[in-house]
Image: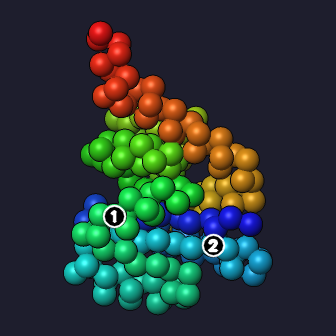
Amino acid sequence: MKLFNVVVLGRFLSENSVEMALKAYAEFYFSITNKYQKRTQLTLIDKRFNQSLNEVLVSQLKIGSSTKYLSLNVQNEVEKTYKNGSLLLLPRIINSSSIIKEAFLYGLPVIGFANSRHDNLLDSTSGLGITYQNELTAVQELANILRLLNYDPDALKMLSKGAARKFERDLSWGERKREAG
């Protein structure tokens, strides 16, 4: 089985967002069997000075054994993580269109809150969005999506292909040049 690698961006985006993502991952992680836990990883990308803050929450949630920390400053490792990641868990998708575009560049589907500002970017072919009601419900719904995609690799593969296609078709400069030319 392939590694199910959930990529989360850290506190440089939103403290609340990373906390919700970590809680959703923990709920997901402890709901799956040991067999699946062994092939599941959370990769937390953040600025180095935030790592100790993240480590406290990771420790409280008891997900340290499946968590990998990656400094935002090590760009080649971030790129490798995007290439090998399963999905980007980005609960709050506010003012993050460049992050979504970068994820799509690597065929990384985005999971987060539905937000009309990004409806043109995030759709059912390239990711999944949930409607925010409250934090507890949001954490549960995000965990459910992680479970679904973990147990259905074909659905995950379809979203990955959709994210890459969306980048190529709608977001890459090469496509815009062809259209203009």
Dot 1 corresponds to which residue?
76
Image location of residue 71, percent across then percent down: 31, 74
Q: CA distance from mark 1 to mark 2?
A: 22 Å
- Picture quadrant of residue 53: bottom left
For the residue pair 119 and 173, the one nearer the viewer reads as 173
Amino acid of disc 2: Thr
10 Å neighbourhood of mark 1: few (<14), some, or many (≥20)?
few
Report the number of discs.
2
Could you tell me which residue is drawn at 37 percent across and 31 percent down? 171
Amino acid of disc 1: Asn
Whether residue 161 is visible to the viewer of this picture, yes or no, is yes
Decide if residue 128 is on the left or right side of residue 167.
right
Task: Please report contact status of discs 1 and 2: CB closer than 8 Å, yes or no.
Answer: no
| Quadrant for the C terminus in the image | top left
Residue 132 is tagged as none
Image location of residue 47, percent across then percent down: 25, 73
Could you tell me which residue is drawn at 37 percent across and 74 percent down? 70
Residue 40 is tagged as 2
Image location of residue 30, percent across then percent down: 67, 78
Decide if residue 138 is on the left or right side of residue 115.
right
10 Å neighbourhood of mark 2: few (<14), some, or many (≥20)?
many
Whether residue 123 is visible to the viewer of this picture, yes or no, is no
For the residue pair 89 and 181, the one nearer the viewer reads as 181
Could you tell me which residue is drawn at 56 percent across and 66 percent down? 5
For the residue pair 37 and 165, the one nearer the viewer reads as 165
Of discs 1 and 2, which sits in the foreground?
1
Residue 104, compared with residue 15, is above or below; it is above
| Quadrant for the N terminus in the image | bottom right
Mark 1: which secondary structure?
helix
Image location of residue 151, percent across then percent down: 75, 59
Residue 4, compared with residue 152, is above or below; it is below
**Sequence order check: which comes first, mark 1 or mark 2?**
2
